[in-house]
Image (cartoon, rainbow, N blue to C red):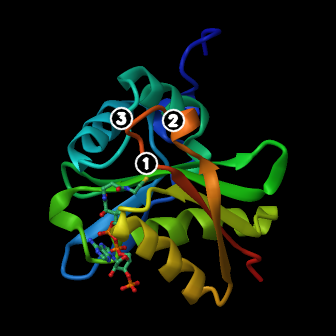
Amino acid sequence: MPPGDASESARYGLNTQVQGNQVDGAAQLAFGTPSVDDGPLMWELAANAGTLDVNSRYAYLLWCRDFADTTVVARDVDRLAGFLTGYRRPQSPDTFFTWQVAVSDDYRRRGLARRMLDHVVGALRPQGVRFVEATVTPDNKASMRLFESFAEANGTNVVVDVLFSERELGSGHEPEMLHRIGPLD
Ligand SMILES: CC(C)(COP(=O)(O)OP(=O)(O)OC[C@H]1O[C@@H](n2cnc3c(N)ncnc32)[C@H](O)[C@@H]1OP(=O)(O)O)[C@@H](O)C(=O)NCCC(=O)NCCS
């Protein structure tokens, strides 16, 4: 592999775990780790999601290169139905921080986001992950319910606190409320 090239594992998704996933009322979706080629599709889905802070296309490409192992994409036959990005916090590796989750309009309210979260966290549990964090803006009911639902299903707590306020985020941006879920058994 040439030095500095996108890693082969990221580009071709060598670590991809593809498994059948029946989302309510939808066809089987393939869940797996992203390849670099998924970066532009994730960027597009984020841009169309409506409520996300959209990062640069470059950021999604880099994400797929370097954080594929803690990211899941849900693929339908010829399109991306959803993705969830996250990472283990460098100073607290028992904590998985969910960075962005987006589901294409046509696939919403069928349990896809929950399944993607279960999928990523399930894969990380054997590596010692016991907490899940995410920030949610107070107006994002769907996102809030997603994390509450995950906590309920795991019989554990959610602690909510302000992570970043308008002071850090800039005027007009709602506060990002940290939801810390756990411990997971
Ligand atoms: C948030 C989002 C990812 C949820 O995806 P989804 O696949 O529709 O969610 P699910 O079907 O897995 O639902 C998870 C839970 O949230 C609930 N929910 C989903 N959408 C909801 C809505 N619009 N209002 C209220 N509750 C909602 C579901 O009923 C479910 O709760 P339950 O387990 O008690 O039944 C999706 O709405 C989205 O892409 N939004 C735009 C991007 C965004 O805001 N991302 C989050 C911030 S990073």
Structural crowding at the residue carrying mark 3, measured as other residues with C-alpha within 10 Å and reported as few (<14), some (14–19) or many (≥20) = some
Front in this rendered view, residue 110 or 168: 168
* Three-letter code, disc 2: Leu
**Residue that carries the numbered disc 2 in the rendered image:** 169
**Residue that carries the numbered disc 1 in the rendered image:** 174
Q: Residue at x 41, y 60 (%)?
A: 31
| Marks 3 and 2, how far apart at CA | 14 Å
Q: Is residue 95 left or right of residue 144?
A: right
Q: Residue at x 41, y 41 (%)?
A: 173
* Three-letter code, disc 1: Glu
Q: Residue at x 72, y 75 (%)?
A: 182
Structural crowding at the residue carrying mark 2, measured as other residues with C-alpha within 10 Å and reported as few (<14), some (14–19) or many (≥20) = few
Instruction: Tell me: is circle 2 under 8 Å from ligand 1.
Output: no
Structural crowding at the residue carrying mark 1, measured as other residues with C-alpha within 10 Å and reported as few (<14), some (14–19) or many (≥20) = some
Q: Secondary structure at mark 3?
A: loop
Q: Which of the four quarters of the rendered structure image does ligand 1 lie in?
A: bottom left
Q: Give how far across and how far down residue 103 sits, in percent.
A: 30, 58
Q: Earlier in the sequence, mark 3 or mark 1?
A: 3
**Residue that carries the numbered disc 3 in the rendered image:** 54
Does the residue at mark 1 contact the one at mark 2 (Cβ under 8 Å)? yes
Q: Earlier in the sequence, mark 3 or mark 2?
A: 3
Q: Is residue 7 above or below residue 126?
A: above
Q: Is residue 169 left or right of residue 39?
A: right
Does the residue at mark 3 contact the one at mark 1 (Cβ under 8 Å)? no
Q: Is residue 174 above or below residue 148?
A: above
Image-quadrant location for residue 181: bottom right
Q: Give how far across and how far down residue 163 sits, in percent.
A: 64, 50
Nearer the observer: mark 3 or 1; the answer is 1
